Amino acid sequence: MRLAPIALISILAPLAATAQVAGTITGTIEGEDAVWQIPSEGDVPLSFFEQSEDGYAVTIRGYPNSEPEDESGMIEISFFASGTIQEPEVRSPRVTVSGGDPVLEATDENVDLILEAFEVEDTDLAIAGSLVTTLTPGGADTLVIDAPEAVTIDGNFQGTIPRAE
């Protein structure tokens, strides 16, 4: 699922008017439309990136509403990007969705994450990409093909996130 620039603007314009939004995660959960906002401020855990000699550790946190009060329904996408900024290689992807008991998780072979844009400028990371992930309660150590408790998310993410302080 790819969003055209005009569609992206139509999604972001209403969000920007209501709160400080750094980006969005859009897609489907089990075929149903879903949208999470990536806040740039607030009392909830926020997105960030850290740079090391080996690359970039990135954590993107999205919430189902533009002014979250807690972590209910939060989606967290984390990974390590190495290589060049023009063609970063994604390692150790992890997706977590909170709000349920147990938490839904997916790692490595259950996360297909592609970076389409990755640009660091001073203290900000402009990022865009897509993901398809199959989450299970507590996560799975092996590839999940078909499990009754599995949840599939297919989506896109984009935003500008700050360097960790």
Image (spheres, rainbow, N blue to C red):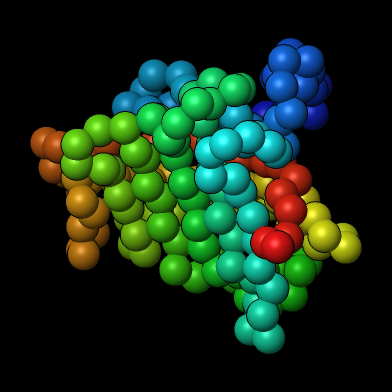
Q: Which residue lies furthest to the front in this view?
A: 43
In the depicted view, which residue is nearer to us: 73 or 111?
73
Q: Residue at x 41, y 57 (%)?
A: 94
Q: Nearer the viewer, residue 112 or 107?
A: 107
164 displayed left or right of 16: left
Give x and y (percent) for residue 161.
Answer: 71, 49
Asked whether the viewer can see residue 141, the reply is: yes
At 44% across and 27% down in the image, what residue appears? 28
The one nearer the camera, 109 or 38, is 38
In the orientation shown, which residue stands out farthest toward the left? Answer: 148
Give above or below for 5 relative to 137.
Answer: above
Question: Is 141 on the left-hand or right-hand side of 54?
Answer: left
Furthest residue in direction bottom, as rendered: 53
Q: How many numbered circles does the render carry?
A: 0
In the rendered image, the vertical position of residue 115 relative to residue 16, given as above or below:
below
Residue at horizontal 63 percent and vertical 84 percent from the top? 54
Q: In which quarter of the image is the N terminus?
A: top right
Q: Please tell me whether residue 8 is drawn above or below residue 149 in the rendered image.
A: above
Please, is residue 94 above or below residue 103 in the view?
below
> Residue 72: x, y in percent?
38, 30
Residue 1 shows up from this direction: no
Q: Residue 52: x and y, percent? A: 67, 80
Quadrant (top left, top right, bottom left, bottom right) of the C terminus:
bottom right
Check the image and name the residue furthest to the right: 122
Instruction: Tell me which corner region of the image, top left, top right, bottom left or bottom right, holds residue 50.
Output: bottom right
